[in-house]
Image (spheres, rainbow, N blue to C red):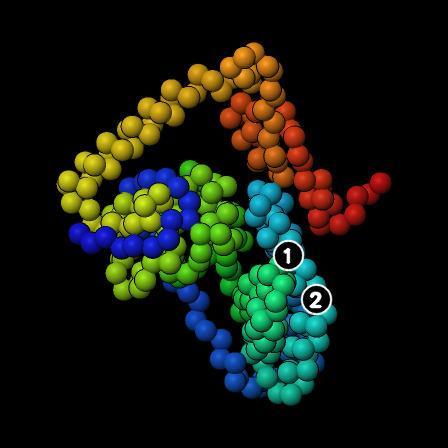
Amino acid sequence: MKVLHGIPAAPGLVIGSAHIIRPTPAVDVTAQRTVEETVDKARLERAIAQAITRLDSLRDIAGSSTAEMLAAQREMLDDPELRQGADALITAGFTAEAAITRVAADYAQQLAALPDPYLAARAEDVQEAGRRIVAELQGTSLEVHLDSAAILVARDLAPAETVGLDPAFLQAIVTEAGSATGHLAIVAQGLGIPAVVGVADVFAQIDEGTTLVVDGDRGTVTIAPDETIRSETKTRLAAAQRDKKDLEVFRDRAGMTADGVRVEVFANIGSLAEARKAVEMGAEGVGLFRTEFIAANGLPSE
């Protein structure tokens, strides 16, 4: 048994089996093209278009917080500076993969150095846009798929990589990278699953299928827990389940203060999935609906 420490990113406690998501091989940024310049430029153009289409499809099924992140990445995919910079490097002799990787890294570095925290945070979106274009060029997918319940263990996970996951299978997330306020933390909190980020050397310490206890409140990951830890975990989970059940009696009751003042409890939604979740959780209506997502993929017909 071993206990790893990280940053608590989303609360909760779970025991389950690890599923390792290894990073894709790094792109050789020095690679020179062996085809005509026009061929690689056409490949790049197709890859960008395919990346935009794929991202739009993911955004249709994403929750509001994740959809916002994907919208930012889409803006980067449409950025003419990214495209023009990559075209220039292809003309200079680089492959499409090397060109877009170099330009995205340079662009991200420039943004990260800006004093405006909002613009600096967009560096992550640029890097993710570059990765997405490379994946299309190589005919691969960045999305993660699960066929059974598991705890995802990865170096990092972008919002788009978790969109298609069945929430019934995704038990928790453990990553080397990330912060308590980063994209992954927001996604995990939205899904209601525990997450611990900033855990060192996860690939060296966790094997596929290893039993883990992920504590998103304490920021710990216990590898191959002994019987004492298993028993303690089961006791805590049972207590949490009892607390949840005790609160369920209030779910469908009208919101009201102790002195009898009526207070309606509305939900903030950005997708059909979130609307269904709001009904399930007893929301009395919708207080904020992200209408920009209705036309996120194009203008309405009327």
Closer to the camera in the image, 55 or 65: 65
Query: Vertically, is 250 above or below 134?
Result: above
Q: Amino acid at mark 2?
A: Asp
Report, in whole angstroms, how far the alpha carbon at label 1 lies from the one at label 2.
Answer: 11 Å
For numbered disc 1, what is the local secondary structure?
Answer: helix
Residue for badge 1:
72
Q: Earlier in the sequence, mark 1 or mark 2?
A: 1
Closer to the camera in the image, 20 or 42: 20
Q: What is the number of the mark on residue 105?
A: none
Query: Vertically, is 79 above or below 253?
Result: below
Label 2 crowd bin: few (<14), some (14–19), many (20+), radius 10 Å: few
Q: Residue furthest top?
A: 260
Where does the C terminus fall, quadrant-wise? top right
Left or right of 238, for residue 88:
right
Q: Position of residue 89 (x, y in %)?
A: 64, 83
Say which residue appears at 71% left-offset and 48% top-offset. Answer: 296
Res. 41 image quadrant: bottom right
